[in-house]
Amino acid sequence: MSKKPKSGLAPAPVKSASNPAELKALSVCASHGNRASELLEILHDVQHELGYVPESVLPVIANAVNLSRAEVHGVVTFYHDFKREPVGRHTIKICRAEACQSMGTDHLCKHAEKSLKTDMGGTSPDGSVTIEQVFCLGNCALSPAILIGDKLYGKVDAKRFDEIVAGLSKETAA
């Protein structure tokens, strides 16, 4: 039984996709039964498959799950973990909370931006690393802290940061 849209009109047929990202989004929506109640899971899966949630897939997802494009856009922009542009192969989250600030995270952030040749929130020119600021990684006793994937690092200074980044390059090459 299909859900009747809020407007009372029949849902628009799912339009065909015009690029690989849109095809992937349609496939992900279908794997979730095109249910609006699974929008967060759909967006997470799209991001997992594509590395980010491109603007071009928002109307495709909206149509497939019978929501407005604005509703889907609102969810993507509300949750900061949804990326709207391609990111690096690795994302380094640097804690900027008070405990880390007191232990030198501002210097660490400046060093990260200089060594990776990008501003906070940006991606290195070679596409390998994106750096982001976050406000608390829960590792205050070992501040300053960074998070890469699901690995948490404590007591990170400029030298240790460079060693960690060099290790990422070796992992990628292997």
Image (cartoon, rainbow, N blue to C red):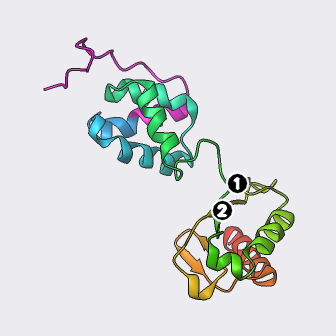
Residue 140 point in image, percent of width and height: 57, 82
Looking at the picture, which amino acid does disc 2 mark? Gln
Callout 2 secondary element: strand
Residue 159 point in image, percent of width and height: 81, 83
In this rendered view, identify the residue nearer to me: 110 or 170: 110
Q: Is residue 48 left or right of residue 141?
A: left
Q: How many labels were placed on the picture? A: 2
Mark 2 burial class by Cα count in 10 Å: few <14, some 14-19, many 20+: some
- As drawn, 22 above or below 96: above
- Distance, label 1 to label 2, CA atoms, is 7 Å
In this rendered view, identify the residue nearer to me: 73 or 59: 73
The quadrant in which residue 133 appears is bottom right
Q: Residue at left 51%, top 77%?
A: 138
Circle 1 residue: 121
- As drawn, 90 above or below 147: above
Residue 2 point in image, percent of width and height: 18, 25
Q: Earlier in the sequence, mark 1 or mark 2?
A: 1
Task: Mark 1 and mark 2 in contact? Answer it, CB < 8 Å.
Answer: yes
Callout 1 secondary element: loop
The answer to whether one can see residue 69 in this image is yes
Residue 118 point in image, percent of width and height: 81, 56
In this rendered view, identify the residue nearer to me: 121 or 53: 121
Q: Is residue 57 left or right of residue 36?
A: right
Circle 2 residue: 133
Instruction: Point out the stretch of residues depicted in magenta.
Output: 1-26
Outermost residue, top direction? 9
Looking at the picture, which amino acid does disc 1 mark? Gly
